[in-house]
Image (cartoon, helix red, strand yellow):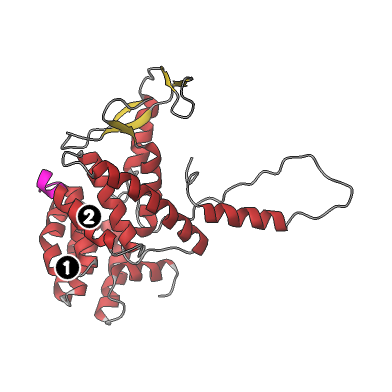
Amino acid sequence: MRLKPVATVMITTAILAACSAIPHKKNNISNEPIVFTEPDPTPAFYSLNPFNYDAPPAFEVDLKKAAAQPVTKMIATSTSYPGKSATFEVNKLIIPTIDSNRADMKYTPLAGLNEIDITNVDDFLQLVEGKARHYPPQFTDKNERRGYETKLREVTNQLDALAAPDNASYDVLIRAFKATVMARNLDLGQQYTTKSLKYGQRLLKINPNDPETNFWFGFNLSEGGGQREAIPYLDKAMKAGVQEAYLSTVNNFLFLDQKKNALTTLHNYKVKYPQEAQVVDRLVLEIQKQGRTNVWENLEAMKQGKY
């Protein structure tokens, strides 16, 4: 299911590559169909669960819940072929589009009035989040990045339309918020910086103490130049138990040239998450020798074995 709708450019590249590899045979034309397999996405760079690196991502948990719940078979008019009916017998991830101020997903084969099947959107957002949650984004394949950019533009347009009403649901707004943050990180246009701030502010108005909103709003501010303004939001996220908020806070303090605060935060992170000791020690060493000051660039260097 993953990346099925993702990148025409990736598909085109795969087709061209496959075609170039087929030998030309005179008078020996095969009737066998040619099957093209889209390449698997490369591994995520960022943890798919920023709340807890050792826990599965929310999307995977939702899929398991949907699969475990009894299915109520539904028959409805096909959206593709008016006048014909279609049978829906697999649970999907359904969210309300309006008038809901909290996460309110349900698992059923078909969305009802003022609801939407968000399964494919969540699948894609998880994939792109693993590459572009923070700036700079981490891609090793240029064609894959182009594919993500193409699909992310489509998804942001879809979510923007759903988020337009003043009473848009929390579920819609949090996805629109995340999508625009990642579009900003992928340098898709200045408009995404403005949109991400507006979505974050709308979410904070709904629930000023929401850990996920504070985390995304805090690091989005920090990585967009609002380092001082980011401090209270990242602090709320840390206190609410968002694991990655510690690293975002360290990154924020490094931007502000507050190395003492950055080292203190790393010490607290190591105490709370001892399994991250090796990462912390490497980051401390790099800070002390005044090397790379961006946490995410440091992590990339570690993964590539550069130090």
Q: Residues within 10 Å of mark 2 (few under 14, many from 20)?
A: many
Q: Is residue 197 visible?
A: yes
Amino acid type of the residue tagged 1 in the rendering: Gly
Residue 91: x %, y % from top left: 39, 26
| Residue 238 rendering spot, x and y as whole percentages | 16, 55
The C terminus sits in image quarter: bottom left
Taking the magenta stretch, the answer to whether it contains residue 205 is yes
Q: How many marks?
A: 2
Region in magenta: 203-210
How many neighbours does mark 1 have within 10 angstroms: few (below 14), some (14-19), or many (20 or more)? some
SS category of the residue bearing label 2: helix
Res 72 → quadrant: top left
**For mark 1, what is the residue?**
226
When the figure is inspected, residue 52 is found, relative to residue 108, above or below; the finding is: below
- Say which residue appears at 24% left-offset and 46% top-offset: 174
The answer to which of 90 and 50 lies nearer the viewer is: 90
Q: Tell me if residue 18 comes above or below residue 281 in the rendering.
A: above
Q: Which residue is mark 2?
A: 216
Q: Give the label on residue 113, or none.
A: none
The amino acid type of the residue labelled 2 equals Trp
